[in-house]
């Protein structure tokens, strides 16, 4: 059955992930984004859509051995992009932050059965899930993601232990500078500060990640200016898109009517 895992990682996951990024995937699937426990980079994995109001339910076929579950154990803050399960609740997909909890005491099989009621696509995906469970050394695992409300998002970001540690170190450095009585550096306006190479490209990537849908050049440029808080030449945005849409360094895909999305990573 290991061929099943190979097909999922090499064929199904990239295909579904690409569809989700352009907003044309069926409501059966969603994206969960974790932080790599070693690399620190964002990792996106397509999963069955278990959205239920402000809770997202996830069943791991490989239990704790799934890579995204290991990432969650290291950092439970995640992002989920999903559309409502039923059409009457809407069709819009958007990213939402949340905190993931592993529930080994929960009956994953019963949870999957209840989530699949009235959803034939979800039950069909369960065939692959059970196949993966047969490969692993342990049974399936339930993961519950408590999604943030709009106001809780900032609180969740600032509760991140890495950020709190960075702020603590910064506070210590400031206290040491003040205690030394040394001369204070004159403040430099944002426009005078040197930018590191590639900052426009980084801003474009962040805008397309946040929007998670195709955008034209004008909208991307406007969003980049809002993100960095200053004026950005339109030519810089156009050049960044054009330079990285083809070749080995391709970061973007140009879709219909001159709109852009992130390329598969």
Image: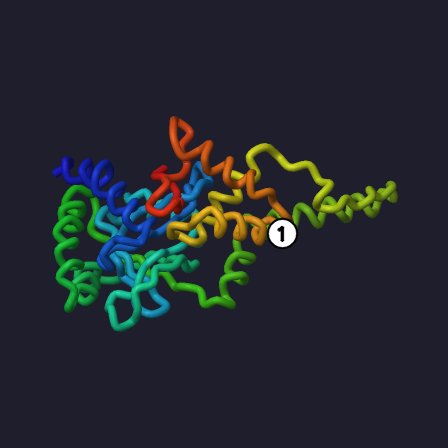
Q: Position of residue 147 (x, y in %)?
A: 40, 63
Viewer-side residue, 197 vs 5: 197
Viewer-side residue, 92 vs 7: 92
Which image quarter: residue 250? top left
Q: Position of residue 131 (x, y in %)?
A: 13, 46
Question: Which residue, given by chain and number where applicable, does mark 1 sit on?
Answer: 229
Q: Can you say whether 222 is above or below 252 in the image?
A: below
* Residue lying at the far top of the rendered structure: 248
* Residue lying at the far bottom of the rendered structure: 88
Viewer-side residue, 74 vs 234: 234
Q: Position of residue 93 (x, y in %)?
A: 34, 60
At 15% from the left and 40% from the top, the residue drawn is 4
Viewer-side residue, 226 vs 27: 226
Which image quarter: residue 51? bottom left
Say how the picture is coloured: rainbow
At 49% from the left and 50% from the top, the residue drawn is 218
Q: In this figure, what is the number of numbered marks? A: 1
Q: Can you say whether 47 is above or below 152 in the image?
A: above
Q: Quadrant of the C terminus?
A: top left
Q: Can you say whether 150 is above or below 200 in the image?
A: below
At 29% from the left and 55% from the top, the residue drawn is 30
> Going by the image, does 64 lie left or right of 215?
left
Q: Quadrant of the N terminus?
A: top left
Mark 1, secondary structure of its residue:
loop
> Going by the image, does 218 lie left or right of 48?
right
At 21% from the left and 52% from the top, the residue drawn is 140
Count neighbours of disc 1 (C-alpha within 10 A) and say few if under 14, some if 14 to 19, many if 20 or more: few
């Amino acid at each position: 059955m290991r061929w099943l895992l190979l097909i999922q990682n090499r064929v199904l996951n990239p295909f579904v992930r690409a569809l989700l990024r352009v907003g044309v995937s069926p409501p059966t699937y969603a994206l969960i984004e974790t932080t790599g426990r070693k690399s620190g980079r964002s990792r996106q994995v397509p999963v069955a859509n278990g959205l239920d109001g402000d809770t997202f339910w996830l069943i791991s076929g490989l239990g704790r051995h799934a890579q995204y579950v290991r990432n969650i154990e290291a950092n439970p803050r995640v992002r989920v992009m999903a559309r409502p399960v039923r059409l009457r609740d809407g069709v819009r997909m958007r990213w939402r932050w949340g905190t993931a909890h592993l529930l080994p005491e929960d009956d994953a099989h019963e949870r999957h059965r209840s989530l699949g009621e009235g959803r034939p696509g979800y039950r069909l995906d369960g065939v692959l899930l059970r196949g993966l469970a047969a490969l692993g050394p342990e049974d399936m695992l339930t993961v519950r993601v408590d999604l943030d409300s709009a106001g809780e998002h900032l609180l969740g970001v600032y509760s991140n232990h890495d950020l709190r540690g960075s702020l603590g170190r910064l506070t210590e450095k400031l206290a040491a500078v003040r205690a030394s009585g040394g001369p204070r550096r004159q403040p430099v306006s944002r426009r005078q500060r040197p930018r590191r190479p590639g900052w426009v490209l980084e801003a474009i990537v962040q805008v397309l990640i946040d929007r998670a849908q195709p955008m034209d050049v004008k909208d991307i440029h406007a969003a980049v200016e809002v993100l960095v808080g200053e004026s950005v030449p339109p030519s810089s945005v156009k050049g960044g898109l054009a330079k990285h849409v083809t070749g080995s360094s391709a970061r973007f895909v140009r879709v219909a009517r001159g709109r852009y999305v992130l390329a598969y990573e």
